[in-house]
């Protein structure tokens, strides 16, 4: 009898683990101006969804008491740096993980200060959804426009605008719709596919997990319902098969004497056994005869999987090369036009030499020209000012030492993104989105 109970428990645990690992994952980022309540909102999401452990809760209570606060300060859950807690701001990107019965989540809590715009770009680069917070008292400010523009630039498929601190404007319906209209005017100038609005109070939990009794005029969903149900399956590129090679596996053991596998992570698309492929830059063609994951052989591999691909022919392939489908080729060029966000305190040098890193490839390059910068107050292009300093956003043209293989960022985020590195200091100076 005891054995049967143990087996039943093990089966239940196994089913729970399987259902968890197969859950859909939503990555989302928070953005907004200083003191808009980003960290408090994340703390409230975790608290109301019962995703905070008991020891974390006790540590929060203790930290809140030390700061002389009457109730738990949920912002302390993500503000982990000492300087963040002292100043009550977010400086670095803080990542938090939690799940509900419907979905797994990875949250990137990004800074609101203008000098940390680069951190926002880093945290938002892989997000499916952007949460833009707006203080109901202040409405749309420069940082709101800046973060909305960056979310558009990074092609984040979904945006939820949370109009926070509604309790401080008397839960005013008129104020909510006024800010909504202002934001829609900005959005009309940007490339935002899906945008939603939710009036909330992160401090009191209004419309976060449970509907607010203070705002009966709002008939839309709560923030948590949106996060759990928003459709993200179509966000992944399953069409353009791209496999940047990271490493060549040659065990040369007795069991695998002739094995030659090309290892890497599938950037986009689907590869199947029997597919006709082409290797870039050589242009040689072959056929996939085997796809391995650890010691298991599979018939097909999807975007995001780390695999080893075995080809029918022995081809000279090295790190930085790319395996693609014969009938679906990326652009191959040395001349690149891209939008950028400048990360470094040292200004951009026109005709300066940098290292360009794209997927697993690394080449030297020269920045030929600054086409324009974006004025964040008006979202207009400035084509006369060529001086690029930290946190500036604009468009540049680059010439690489040898051709790279890419898609436009709008079409394929994985193969349309690059970073620029200072070849002297080895610092990352810019993130780029290929046009």
Image: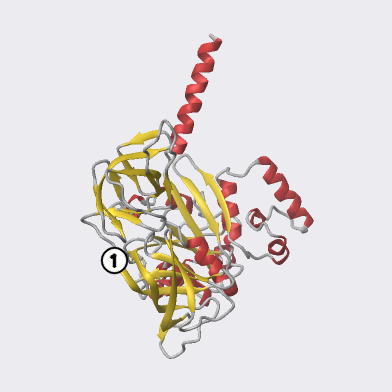
Vertical relation: 171 (above or below) 233:
below
Vertical relation: 223 (above or below) 337:
above
Of residue 422 and residue 202, the one placed in the foreground of this image is 422
Vertical relation: 179 (above or below) 70:
below
81 on left or right of 162: right
Vertical relation: 112 (above or below) 216:
below
Question: x, y (%) of residue 1?
Answer: 53, 8
Q: Residue at x 31, y 59 (%)?
A: 280
Q: Quadrant of residue 115?
A: bottom right
Question: x, y (%) of residue 394?
Answer: 43, 78
Question: x, y (%) of residue 292?
Answer: 37, 38
Q: Residue at x 65, y 58 (%)?
A: 79
Of residue 220 and residue 394, the one placed in the foreground of this image is 394
Which residue position holds label 1? 331
Of residue 42 and residue 415, the one placed in the foreground of this image is 415
Q: Residue at x 47, y 66 (%)?
A: 173
Question: x, y (%) of residue 413?
Answer: 38, 61
Q: Quadrant of residue 256?
A: top left
């Amino acid at each position: 009898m005891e054995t049967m109970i143990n087996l039943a428990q093990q089966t239940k645990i196994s089913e729970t683990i399987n259902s968890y690992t197969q859950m859909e994952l939503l990555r989302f980022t928070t953005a907004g101006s200083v003191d808009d309540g980003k960290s408090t909102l994340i703390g409230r999401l975790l608290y109301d969804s019962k995703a905070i452990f008991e020891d974390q809760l006790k540590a929060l209570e203790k930290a809140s008491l030390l700061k002389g606060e009457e109730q738990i300060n949920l912002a302390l859950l993500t503000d982990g740096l000492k300087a963040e807690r002292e100043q009550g701001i977010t400086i670095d990107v803080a990542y938090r993980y939690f799940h509900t019965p419907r979905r797994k989540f990875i949250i990137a809590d990004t800074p609101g200060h203008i000098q940390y715009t680069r951190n926002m770009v880093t945290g938002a680069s892989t997000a499916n959804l952007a949460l833009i917070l707006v203080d109901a008292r202040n409405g749309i400010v420069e940082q709101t426009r800046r973060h909305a523009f960056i979310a558009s630039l990074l092609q984040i498929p979904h945006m939820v605008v949370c109009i926070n601190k509604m309790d401080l404007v008397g839960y005013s319906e008129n104020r909510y719709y006024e800010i909504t209209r202002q934001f829609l005017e900005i959005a009309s100038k940007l490339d935002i596919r899906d945008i939603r609005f939710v009036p909330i109070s992160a401090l009191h939990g209004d419309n976060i997990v449970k509907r607010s009794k203070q705002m009966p005029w709002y008939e839309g969903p709560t923030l948590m319902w949106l996060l759990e149900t928003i459709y993200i399956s179509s966000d992944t590129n399953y069409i353009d098969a791209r496999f940047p090679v990271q490493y060549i596996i040659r065990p040369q053991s007795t069991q695998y004497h002739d094995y030659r596998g090309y290892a890497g992570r599938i950037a986009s698309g689907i590869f199947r056994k029997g597919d006709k492929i082409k290797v870039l830059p050589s242009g040689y063609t072959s056929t996939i005869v085997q796809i391995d994951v650890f010691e298991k052989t599979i018939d097909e591999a999807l975007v995001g999987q780390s695999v080893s691909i075995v080809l029918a022919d022995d081809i000279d392939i090295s790190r930085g090369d790319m395996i693609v489908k014969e009938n679906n080729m990326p652009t191959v060029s040395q001349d690149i036009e891209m939008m950028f966000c400048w990360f470094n305190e040292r200004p951009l040098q026109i005709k300066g030499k940098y290292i360009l890193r794209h997927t697993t490839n690394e080449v030297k390059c020269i920045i030929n020209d600054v086409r324009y910068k974006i004025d964040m107050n008006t979202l207009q292009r400035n084509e006369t000012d060529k001086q690029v300093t930290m946190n500036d956003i604009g468009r540049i043209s680059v010439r690489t030492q040898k051709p790279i293989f890419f898609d436009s960022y709008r079409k394929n985020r994985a193969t349309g993104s690059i970073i620029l590195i200072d070849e002297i200091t080895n610092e990352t100076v810019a993130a780029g989105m290929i046009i």
